Image (cartoon, rainbow, N blue to C red):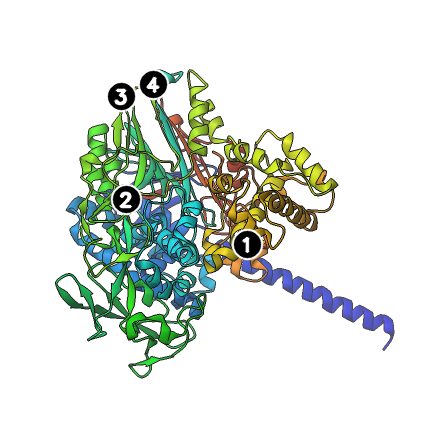
Amino acid sequence: MTARRVVSWVARGLAAFAVLLVLVVGGLYLWLRTSLPKVDGTLALPGLVAAVTVDRDKVGVPHIMAQNEHDAAFALGFVHAQDRIFQMDILRRYGEGRLAELGGKAALPRDEFMRTLGLKEAAEAEWDSLDPPVRAYLQAYADGVNAYEAHHAGASMPYYDFVPGPAKWSPVDSIVISKVMALYLTQNFRRELEHALIARRVTAEELHDLYPPYPERGLVTLSAILKTLPLTRLAARMPKDFSRAEASNDWVVAGGRTTTGKPLLENDPHLTYMTPAIWYLARIQSPQHDLAGATIPGTPFVIVGHNDHSGWGFTETGGDAEDLFIEKVDPADPGRYLAPGGSRAFRTRKETIHVKGGADVTITVRSTRHGPVISDVGTPGLLFGTESRWDSATGKGGTSGKGADAGGGTAASAVLPDGGKGYVLSLEATFLQPGDRTAEAFWGMDRASDWASFKSPLKDFTAPQMNIVYADTAGTTGFMAPAKIPIRKKGDGWLPEPGWTGDYDWSGFIPFDALPQSVDPPQGRFVTANNKIVPDSYPYFLTHDWAPPFRADRIAGLLDAMPKQSARSTGRIASDTKSLMAQRLLPVLTAAPPDDARARKAIGILKAWDDGMDRKAAAPLIFTAWIREIEKELFAKRLGSGFARYFRPHPTVLQRLLVPGSPWCRAAGGSGQGGCEHLVAHALSVALGDLSRRHGEDMSAWHWGQAHQADFRNIVLSRVPLLGSLFKLQIPAPGGSETVNAGDMHYGDEKNPFLDVAGPGLRMVLDFSDLSHSRFLMAPGQSENPFSPHYGDLMKPWRDFSWMEIGDAESAHSLNLSPE
């Protein structure tokens, strides 16, 4: 056989293989595309009362036109499932503690934590308390979700190629998702844990430095107990999803200050970026109501948006609706704990977690009169100085004898003081208690026609506490911060308190009429940006954890600088990236003499900077890297295991500590060096060296967008090799942690410390002169399906502030749903 013939056969074989590969890949692609939803034509569905039309615009936003409220809820459930069924399923599983069924052992810590909290049980209790119309609405929505599952004829959503498909949807599942959001946004007990971790390392005076204004009381008797509790282990086992503080902006301007004579309302909730997005835009019309705005897939309500007459937006207040209690185990009986009036038995229940690829894991969850014992997470039953684990195979308990707190390095036998009598941490939270009827509040808000009918259902709003700005077509503007905020007999919930005395128990809740609220203010505007909303004279305690006022001050200043606002100028304020934090800190930082020519050049760039966090500028990158290194040098060694939770921008702290003679600078500077000038100069040198390694030596070529990319990480595909990079959604973005157009970072990520991981994934401007022309932005897209054109098509319009209207846009698709 000649060489030419061999080459010819090989070439033919390769060509045939290539053709076969193209056919296989092409066929697979075409099959996967059948997972896309049906958006044109007609579908007959059981459960509908009358015909419904679902028009979708060019970016996939549905406009639902129903003839009754039941069918409106049904259709919303159907379209949510079409575009987001996997997200809904994951959120439900998360809240119920069932992720290990999909992710195996890696998901066990989350499941143990969620099972311990008991969100599913709390959701079932809320369902039982709801009024019949709200229950019927939730049931209609669930029926719509299940109708999609029953009638989808193509491939499953691509994510279900890796995991089992979803189970039938129930109304309680929607409430579970609302509980997940309440847990996600109510930050208090995570802050208490952070405070406690750091309090074990520093003095009371140093706490004043780290948390201005720290509440005016010392640690006194609890300091020793805090050092014995397994706080480091608990922090490590806590889901990372709940390790961030979130932020938001909203404001409303009265008609007397607008070009149309009607109010304008802006809202941009700042949450963690992800794919799919937390939000889903929709318009829902029925003879009763015309709703438009942002929904959360899995729930049937418009969360922020408007109806025919009124509109509203949210920011987090930070109201303290959670407390950690240190419970003392009864020395005579480890199955009991001490309480006023004597000892009580722990309430216990068994939870069995199914683990993909492994044996079931059964844990014992304990609860006290305050709530679940969260210090048991990861080590169920912390008793007698040992770690007691429930063995699902034998049905018996066991002990390990290992150290309970890796951060503290204490042996298990030394973890519990007083000869092994022991202490545990329990969590009291309003949204875990009976009486939560938050679903009623959203139901009522969506149907409000004026301020009175909007405010009334807020009595049922339990958690998290929100700053709600309101306006209506009649010209009324309003503000309220509803929630159940506890009144404490003693203390302020800033640190875990003794549970056995009863001195720190909740004695009730702030009366509804005494919660912060106002209507039609003389200044013609309300502005909230997680800043302090009540004066020192307010008679009740809300929280110590207010955000710095940088964003609120900037918004108020821009509003007051313009006599009349328009929808366009309001949108420009939302895009503002001027950093009042940088404006305040830069004089402190640049006062230090530079170490070398590179530092002199960097300081020259910063002194010429206009304080705007522009994605094309070098100064924001230099400034942010500098303050990050300063915080590491000041706090990393001193705070130990608590530093990871504290590590984020603290501009007011830095301004207070970077002064001549600061003990923090002396301690961080090392023997014989000390002083803030040395520390600041050294931090700049380290920051510039790091930036040079990442972005090259040419400082003039640096720009903020190189490092500050808005990262919408896919919740599943990002974990799959190759697919993660194939479907990655990132875009260079402006803004910083304290700008109106925010872009928050995770400082502790050494690989990508300036990646933009949280911010205004949703933006909204409501114009009450014509609500049909209200404007929205959302990223990354309406669909979770990577084969959909709407998977990431909204990222660039979102980043560039190319506003869109929803509901009245020209329809690109029309689907008719009819009763079967």
Q: Amino acid at mark 1?
A: Asp
- In primary-sequence order, the first of circles 3 and 4 is 4
Residue pointed to by mark 3: 474
Residue at point 52% right, 48% down?
A: 664
Q: Amino acid at mark 2?
A: Ala
Q: Which mark is residue 749?
A: 1
> Does the rendering let one see residue 274?
yes
Q: Which mark is residue 450?
A: none
Q: Amino acid at mark 4?
A: Gly
Image-quadrant location for residue 325: bottom left
Q: Mark 4 packing: few (<14 Cα in 10 Å), some, or many (20+)?
A: many
Mark 4 vs mark 1: in front: 1
Residue 724's place in the image compared with 482, above or below, is: below
Residue 436's place in the image compared with 290, above or below, is: below
Residue pointed to by mark 4: 255
| Closer to us: 191 or 164 | 191
Residue 687 position, x and y percent, is: 64, 47
Residue at point 34% right, 16% down?
A: 256
- In primary-sequence order, the first of circles 3 and 2 is 2
Residue at point 42% right, 15% down?
A: 563
Residue 802 position, x and y percent, is: 51, 31
Between the residue at mark 3 and the residue at mark 1, the CA separation in whole angstroms equals 49 Å
Residue pointed to by mark 2: 73
Q: Mark 1 packing: few (<14 Cα in 10 Å), some, or many (20+)?
A: few
Q: Mark 2 packing: few (<14 Cα in 10 Å), some, or many (20+)?
A: many
Decide if residue 100 is on the left or right side of residue 21: left
Decide if residue 674 is on the left or right side of residue 777: right
- In primary-sequence order, the first of circles 4 and 1 is 4
> Does the rendering let one see residue 353?
no
Between the residue at mark 1 and the residue at mark 2, the CA separation in whole angstroms equals 42 Å
Marks 1 and 2 close (CB-CB < 8 Å)? no
Image-quadrant location for residue 698: top right
